[in-house]
Image (cartoon, grey):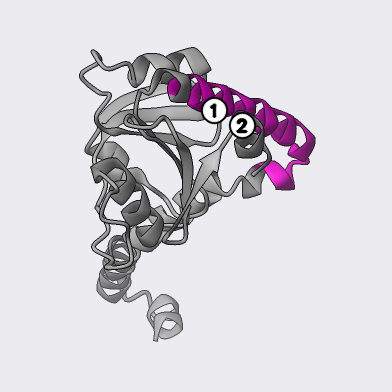
C-alpha cells in the first residue's frame, strides 16, 4: 500500500503512515521500558561489558582488594561487638532497596564500613549495600524471614540477612552485636562462625 501511495503521490496517506509509524515506535518503547531498564541494570551488575572489553584481570584484582577490606571491617566490628549487615549484590539488582536508603556511592573502605556501623551513627541499625566496587547506600531496610526453621534466638539483623538471601542472590555478611560472631547468609541459609581469613576465603 505504501508503494502504491508513493507511486501515485498520495500525500495524505503518506503523512498519516509517517505519523502512525512515529507513534508506534514511542508505544513500543513505553511498553518494553521495564524490560529495557532491567536489561541495562543486568549489564552493569554482571560486568558483561567489562568482560567483553577484556578487563577481567583488573576486575579480579579490584574484587580481591574489596573482599579483603570487607573482611577486615567485619573482623574489627566483631572484636568491638558492633553489629553490622553488609549486603553484596550479585546478578539480581538491589536498586529498589537502594532508592529507599541513604545514598553514599563511595569506594569500599574498611574505615568507612566501621564508621557506618559505629553505635552512635544514626545509620548503624540498617544495612549497607555493595554494588561492584562501591558502597551505594546505608541505612537500608530489608525483609525479615518468617521461616519456622530459624533459631528463635536470632535477632532482627540476622532475620533480615536471611530474608534478603531468600529474596535475592546476594551474599550477606552479618556481625552480631551480642556475641561478635560473623555469619554469612546465602540462598536462605545462615552459616556462622567465620574469622577474617575464612570470611575472605569464602
SS at mark 2? helix
Quadrant in which the C terminus is drawn: top right
SS at mark 1? helix
Residue beneath disc 1: 70
Residue 144: horizontal and vertical position, in percent? 25, 53
* Residue depicted at 24% across the width and 41% down the height: 141
Label 1 packing within 10 angstroms: few (<14), some (14-19), many (20+): many
Which sits in the foreground, 157 or 99? 157
Asked whether the residues under the numbered discs 1 and 2 touch, taking CB atoms below 8 Å apart as contact, a structural biologist would say: yes
Taking 100 as reference, is 1 above or below it?
Answer: below
Quadrant assignment, res 177: top left
Q: Is residue 76 within the magenta segment? A: yes
Asked whether, in this view, residue 92 is left or right of residue 59, the answer is: left
* Residue depicted at 52% across the width and 18% down the height: 109
* Residue depicted at 37% across the width and 47% down the height: 94
Taking 171 as reference, is 178 above or below it?
Answer: above
Residue 140: horizontal and vertical position, in percent? 27, 36
Which sits in the foreground, 159 or 130? 159
Quadrant in which the N terminus is drawn: bottom left
> What residue span does the magenta drawing correspond to?
50-77
Which sits in the foreground, 161 or 77? 77
* Residue depicted at 46% across the width and 61% down the height: 187
Label 2 packing within 10 angstroms: few (<14), some (14-19), many (20+): some
Which sits in the foreground, 6 or 154? 154
Residue beneath disc 2: 67
What secondary structure do most residues of the magenta stretch adopt? helix
Q: Is residue 30 within the magenta segment? A: no
Amino acid at each position: 500500500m505504501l508503494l502504491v501511495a508513493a507511486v501515485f503521490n498520495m500525500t495524505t496517506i503518506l503523512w498519516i503512515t509517517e505519523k502512525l509509524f512515529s507513534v508506534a515506535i514511542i508505544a513500543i518503547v513505553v511498553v518494553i521500558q521495564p524490560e529495557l531498564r532491567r536489561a541495562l541494570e543486568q549489564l552493569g551488575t554482571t560486568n558483561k561489558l567489562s568482560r567483553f572489553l577484556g578487563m577481567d584481570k583488573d576486575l579480579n584484582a579490584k574484587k580481591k582488594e574489596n573482599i579483603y577490606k570487607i573482611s577486615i571491617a567485619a573482623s574489627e566490628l566483631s572484636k568491638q561487638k558492633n553489629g553490622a549487615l553488609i549486603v553484596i549484590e550479585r546478578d539480581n539488582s538491589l536498586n529498589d532497596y537502594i532508592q529507599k536508603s541513604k545514598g553514599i556511592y563511595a569506594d569500599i573502605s574498611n574505615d568507612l564500613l566501621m564508621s557506618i556501623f559505629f553505635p552512635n551513627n544514626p545509620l548503624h541499625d540498617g544495612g549497607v549495600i555493595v554494588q561492584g566496587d562501591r558502597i551505594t547506600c546505608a541505612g537500608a531496610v530489608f525483609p525479615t524471614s518468617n521461616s519456622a526453621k530459624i533459631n528463635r534466638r536470632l535477632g532482627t539483623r540476622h532475620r533480615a540477612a536471611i530474608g534478603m538471601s531468600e529474596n535475592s542472590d546476594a551474599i550477606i555478611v552479618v556481625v552480631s552485636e551480642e556475641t561478635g560472631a560473623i555469619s554469612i547468609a546465602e540462598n536462605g541459609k545462615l552459616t556462622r562462625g567465620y574469622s577474617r581469613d575464612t570470611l575472605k576465603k569464602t
